[in-house]
Image (cartoon, grey):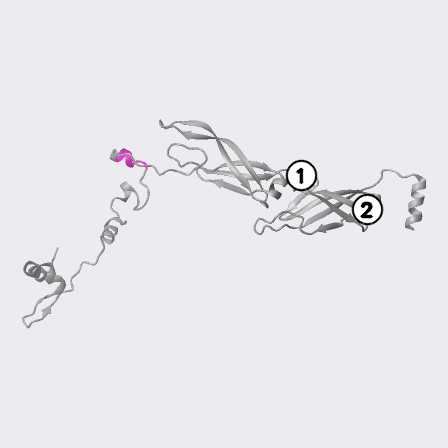
């Protein structure tokens, strides 16, 4: 639409080029021009409809999902975006020996798989997992798409979560191992050589020559758990529990008093 009569005449005689670039001025030059349509179509739609697309109410926003009633309104079947279900979490028990040395584990579980007719059936699945030396309690190994399958959904992931079995006398903080040694009152006062079994099949002989006071610990360097990143072993910290006698004879009491006084 060209309301000014002059622009109409220019367009009829010189076309769109005359409007944009100008017309001959009779002296070898041009006059006028610079008529361009600089407004984007989206801006025109926004001015009239309040949105960049006049079909937003029907089809939903641009680059967005269509409304639920679209299929009923148009008679077309909309393609559903597959959803990602929550992962299947499986706990796997490991021992201190497994974590100390590393171990290969085989884990079986049941998952649902899709048949060609879109129904599901159960299937026993196996996972081979390598426990790295130094893994910490709660470590999670993820196996993408190894979980349940379903219609209109992506296969779920499987997450194997490591749970450390309790070990009598042992505990752990990072690469530091803690061992609780039980000694008698006589051993706490007079000393003892502790024999501590390691998780790689050795026996540590640890002499205790000082008096074992309440809360005392003894550190053995380099006999802890391997560090996951460096592979170097931490320390072994020995804690003590002293067992006191339930009764003493008068003679024993007198002897102790004489010795300690």
Q: Is residue 30 left or right of residue 111?
A: left
User: Residue 105 lies in what quarter of the image?
Assistant: top right
Please name the residue shown 75% across and 47% down the image. 206
Please name the residue shown 55% across and 43% down the image. 139
Q: Is residue 101 above or below residue 37?
A: above
From the top left corner, tell me how far across and down residue 231 is, in percent: 59, 50
Label 1 environment density (alpha carbons within 10 Å; few <14, some 14–19, many ≥20)? few
Q: Mark 1 points at which residue?
A: 167
Local secondary structure at mark 1: loop
Which sits in the foreground, 188 or 205? 205
The magenta stretch spans residue 72: yes
Which sits in the foreground, 221 or 54? 221
Q: Mark 2 points at which residue?
A: 188
From the top left corner, tell me how far across and down residue 95 is, in percent: 62, 38
Label 2 environment density (alpha carbons within 10 Å; few <14, some 14–19, many ≥20)? many
From the top left corner, tell me how far across and down residue 181 is, in percent: 75, 43
From the top left corner, tell me how far across and down residue 2 is, in percent: 12, 57
Tell me whether circle 2 and circle 1 mark residues in contact (CB < 8 Å).
no
Please name the predominant secondary structure of the magenta segment in the image.
helix
- Label drawn at residue 236: none
Magenta-colored span: 68-73
Say how many tags the image has. 2
Local secondary structure at mark 2: helix
The magenta stretch spans residue 247: no
Quarter containing the N terminus: bottom left
Counting residues from the N terminus, which is met first, the one under dot 2 or under dot 1? 1
Disc 2/disc 1 C-alpha distance (Å) = 24 Å
């Amino acid at each position: 639409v060209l309301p000014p009569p002059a622009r109409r005449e220019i367009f009829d005689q010189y076309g769109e080029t005359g409007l944009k670039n100008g017309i001959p001025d009779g002296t070898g030059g041009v006059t006028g021009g610079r008529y361009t349509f600089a407004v984007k179509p989206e801006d025109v739609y926004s001015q009239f409809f309040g949105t960049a697309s006049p079909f937003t109410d029907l089809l939903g926003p641009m680059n967005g999902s269509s409304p639920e009633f679209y299929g009923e309104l148009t008679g077309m079947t909309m393609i559903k975006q597959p959803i990602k279900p929550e992962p299947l979490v499986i706990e796997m028990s490991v021992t201190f020996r497994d974590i100390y040395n590393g171990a290969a584990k085989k884990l079986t579980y049941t998952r649902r798989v899709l048949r060609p007719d879109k129904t599901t059936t159960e299937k026993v699945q196996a996972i081979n997992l390598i426990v790295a030396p130094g893994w910490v309690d709660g470590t999670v190994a993820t196996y993408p798409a190894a979980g349940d399958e379903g219609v209109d959904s992506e296969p779920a992931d499987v997450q194997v979560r490591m749970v450390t079995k309790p070990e009598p006398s042992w505990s752990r903080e990072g690469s530091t191992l803690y061992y609780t040694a039980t000694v008698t009152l006589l051993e706490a006062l007079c000393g003892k050589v502790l024999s501590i079994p390691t998780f790689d099949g050795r026996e540590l002989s640890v002499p205790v020559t000082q008096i074992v006071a309440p809360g005392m610990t003894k550190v053995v360097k380099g006999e802890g758990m391997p560090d996951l990143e460096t592979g170097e072993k931490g320390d072994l910290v020995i804690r003590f529990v002293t067992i006191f006698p339930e009764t003493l004879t008068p003679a024993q009491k007198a002897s102790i008093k004489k010795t300690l006084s």
